[in-house]
Amino acid sequence: MKLWQENIKKITPYTPGEQPENKNIIKLNTNESPYSPSPNVINALKNYNINNLRLYPSFVCDELKTELTKIYPVNKDEIFLGNGSDEVLALCFMTFFNSKKSILFPDITYSFYKVWCNLYNIPFKTIPVDKNFKINKEDYFKQNGGIVITNPNAPTSIYMDTSEIEDILKNNKSSIVIVDEAYIDFGGKTMAHLINKYDNLVVVQTYSKSRALAGIRVGYALANSELVSALESVKNSFNSYTLNSLSQLVATEATKDTQYFNLCVDKIKSSRQWTINELNNLGFSTLDSRTNFIFTTNKNIDAKYLFEKLKEKNIYIRYFDKPRINQHLRITIGTQEQMEKLIKAIKEIIKKTSIS
Amino acid sequence: MKLWQENIKKITPYTPGEQPENKNIIKLNTNESPYSPSPNVINALKNYNINNLRLYPSFVCDELKTELTKIYPVNKDEIFLGNGSDEVLALCFMTFFNSKKSILFPDITYSFYKVWCNLYNIPFKTIPVDKNFKINKEDYFKQNGGIVITNPNAPTSIYMDTSEIEDILKNNKSSIVIVDEAYIDFGGKTMAHLINKYDNLVVVQTYSKSRALAGIRVGYALANSELVSALESVKNSFNSYTLNSLSQLVATEATKDTQYFNLCVDKIKSSRQWTINELNNLGFSTLDSRTNFIFTTNKNIDAKYLFEKLKEKNIYIRYFDKPRINQHLRITIGTQEQMEKLIKAIKEIIKKTSIS
């Protein structure tokens, strides 16, 4: 062993959903939007003066923050922008979770939380969700170094009423509570308006899901200006310019187009309901989704088997080989046409399996 | 004091050069290129199908890596891409510098190194450059937890012969040596071809300077595949998708246009020589620059005074209020026209100062 190898960080990274190069698949595995971003973006890119690309991006991201203040009742100094909500969360963990006490999050939730704890040596305890995958607020009324709640939760798709999270906030005035609202636009109620009522609340959102812009990597945290200022200091100690000029431009233009945004979200919600009905008619049991994906199980079909059979038919969904959820499947809501093809494919697989 | 405040990371961030909103200034303060990126980029953006932005970016960045393998004698698995070379360096520090021994870097160099050490609690010692601002290789022949050398160095602009850095590598087989080549294209010789000769060598470069793309935030490290693999694991434990789709596209297109790249670099070198001559004729003493900036001093004019007077004339250069260099100024090489305006302005300031 070479001596320098001893000092290299060894770590098991997060594993995102597959990103196959094959463009002919139906891709329902990473919770992207099936709809194009706002057509405003086309013109913005066409008319962009590339001479600006020689310059560093805007440090303050004023235009994008201005658009966000039109959507949420917050001031610009209550917005922290980052290179995707993953970076925002990574920097939140680094900034806020420096206690010797364990931070708490559900056992079934976004699996990146555990990875960040390992990266920064943050002690953590996972709190089991109940047998219906629900988060029980009382489980979080105990000593901790911070709390992270995804609402709606992933991969379960379940929404927790904000009054319950308010109870968690009230019972944890000594620690920061991060509410990861990556999927909030598909049927939940944001807590953005509460960042000044609760000075320990950090709300995190993303452009990758409802805003159909996973490709530009933009996410943000909303919190009181003291917390945002602490985040800015840590960010500026890591990488001064995390948001490139084109992503700022595209996100700004897309944010202006509220009408198109609502249209796409409504289509996804409608296809979601249709898909849940179809699946349940086929014997599936599907959780009440408030996200752009569903979490479903069928006691007559092995989840991994169905996952693999669908892949053979070029339909990619997500399977987690993990305790408690290894008989469930997470399926992103695509276009109505894609969901019809999915249901057709599942029917074929069920039929063949029954015969053989 | 609220209890959660105790657990917030307190840190002094890096301070980048000013990014004034006023577009009518001559901006020679952050080492950006005065030339537009390759015209290839215009068409690439015009023809881009924005529907792709709804999807996560390519995880492997294959196209951009392929272009880089045409420029440097490296394989794709020897390239690590990041959101600007600042992110690449930030992740290198996190990945490679986990020894209890101090890492070493010059006292006068890129001031972000110290900030990353503070962020990650990496012990460090700065090694004074000599009175001519030169790095003495023998100073690095001693126990350490890693070494960082900027070549050419910033803000001094001085180039160190690669044979001297090879001696540092040979005398430090137990630690990782990062060579930050942000400015290498303006007159230095890259060490990229040596990453397999020295398994402890990491070469870092950026698209922000010679490639005229500070706005898209792309940087990279070249190192043997084992080191790159360690970097990838840490990156994937921080943020899976650091390089957005548009930055990948723009960088790929720009990289293809070698002819335009060479043309711009040559123009900058030529204006650099002209500016150095003019300044020295005015009594300045300017270091032998191999970068797109110069580091200059004039014993008859206070550096900070000249910096402020130029700002009044809407010409922004960089002044560092730090020991040893507080009588020097760092001036980015702009277009020939901008440099002529700079010299004219300096002449006016000198004239007024002599009269009063």
Image (cartoon, coloured by chain):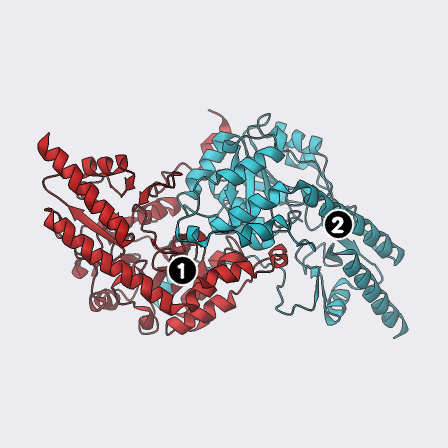
Chain colours: A cyan, B red
Q: Quadrant of residue B320?
A: top left
The number of callouts visible is: 2
Residue corresponding to mark 2:
A268
For the N terminus of chain A, the image quarter is bottom left
Q: Is residue A159 left or right of residue B145?
A: right
Q: Residues within 10 Å of mark 1 (few under 14, many from 20)?
A: many
Q: Disc 2 on helix, strand or loop?
A: helix
**Spot occupied by residue A257 in the image (x, y as percentages of width and height):** 64, 43
Write the residue at 26% across / 66% down: B169
Q: Amino acid at mark 1?
A: Ile
Residue type of the residue flagged with mark 2? Ile
Q: Residue at position x 70%, y 36% from top?
A: A189
Q: Secondary structure at mark 1?
A: loop
Q: CA distance from mark 1 to mark 2?
A: 45 Å
Label 1, on which residue?
A8
Residue at 55% x, 33% y: name it.
A223
Disc on the earlier residue, 1 or 2: 1
Q: Position of residue A276 (x, y in %)?
A: 82, 52
> Does residue A275 appear left or right of residue B42 in this picture?
right
Q: Is residue A212 above or below residue B166?
A: above
Protein chain holding label 1: A
Chain letter of the residue beneath label 2 in the structure image = A
Where does the image place residue A201, in percent across and percent down from the top left? 58, 33
